[in-house]
Image: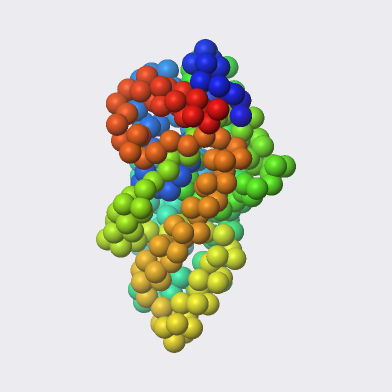
Amino acid sequence: MIYQSAAEWQAAKCKRVLVFGMSGLGKTHIANLLRAGGNWFHYSIDYRIGTRYMGEHIADNFKREAMKVPLLRELLMTDSVHITSNITFNNLAPLSTYLGKPGDPAKGGLPFTEYMRRQDQHRTAEIAALLDTVHFAERAQSLYGYDHFICDSGGSICEVVDPDDPADPVLTALSNAALMVWIKGSDAHTEELIRRFDRAPKPMYYQPDFLHAAWAEYLKTNDLTEEKVDPDAFVRWAYSRALAHRQPLYEAMARNWGITVTAEEVAQISTPGDFESLVAGALEARG
């Protein structure tokens, strides 16, 4: 870790952190709070993925749909309209929409092979965006003059690293650039995340092995062919399993590469100073 003690963290003139954990536990809340304070640069992994690395895939998908409409096709073919996504830190819908869900095309589902192709694109993009953290941490200070830096990672960071490998290239680069901070949720948080997801299921990235096994199990258990799968029903079914799958990965990341704070503690933060004190306490507890 780049800060070995609470005293070292508190004395650092340039503080650099990366927050990770399941979506919905406070990563973006912290990032927005720190950015609003004026001294912190906010680097969003999901925003970087959706703009720098998958922006063209997303825009091409919009254009593919638009080409099915005669009027829009004519305008596109004559360069009379411009189609792009409007991704922001707080609105990543174009990225999740592009990832899609597998199943019945009449319900908006994708063929499983196409779904996995897009998943693989996301994996490549996420690794690249994570490795860009090093560049942006330096750029925030040298170009923009920010004292401090926070990387708001996506919930799927644990799907693209091996936390038990001391030579993992992504985690090595990240831990050399910023302090890794896990926001740990409780069982109650997990239940609430599942309820929230059930109300509005959204596409996510998962490890290929996890998805292949989940897809095969879902088809067999429900005696379905690919074309008969309700896309929302499948991603709802997979989500709770994904939380259980990710939990030990997050734990290993925190144990081997960083520190842990709780979602309850994060919810109490109202100033950048509160966050700095929380991190100091977690470093002291780690010893």
Q: Is residue 191 above or below residue 142?
A: below
**Which colour style is shown?**
rainbow
Left or right of residue 264, residue 5 in this image: right
Q: Is residue 150 visible?
A: no
Task: State the quadrant of the N terminus.
Answer: top right
Considering only vertical position in the picture, is 134 above or below 109?
above
Count of numbered badges drawn on the protein: 0
Identify the residue at image location x=40%, y=31%.
31
Q: Quadrant of residue 87?
A: top left
Comparing 260 with 171, the one in front is 260
Residue 270 percent across, percent down from the top left? 29, 26
Residue 156 coordinates in the image, percent (x, y): 50, 50
In the picture as drawn, the residue positioned furthest to the bottom comes out as: 223
Measuring 55% from the left and 65% from the top, which residue is drawn there? 210
Name the side, left or right, on which 107 lies relative to 169: left
**Camera-side residue: 163 or 156?**
163
**The quadrant where residue 207 appears:** bottom right
Is residue 188 found left or right of 161 in the rendered image? left
**Residue that sits furthest to the right in the current view:** 167
The foreground one among 244 and 34 is 244
189 lies above or below 227: above
Residue at 69% over, 47% down: 165
The spot of residue 115 in percent (x, y) is: 51, 66
Residue 39 seen: yes
Quarter where residue 266 is shown? top left
State whether residue 199 is above or below residue 143.
below
Q: Position of residue 158 (x, y in %)?
A: 55, 49
* Quadrant location of the C terminus in the rendered image: top right
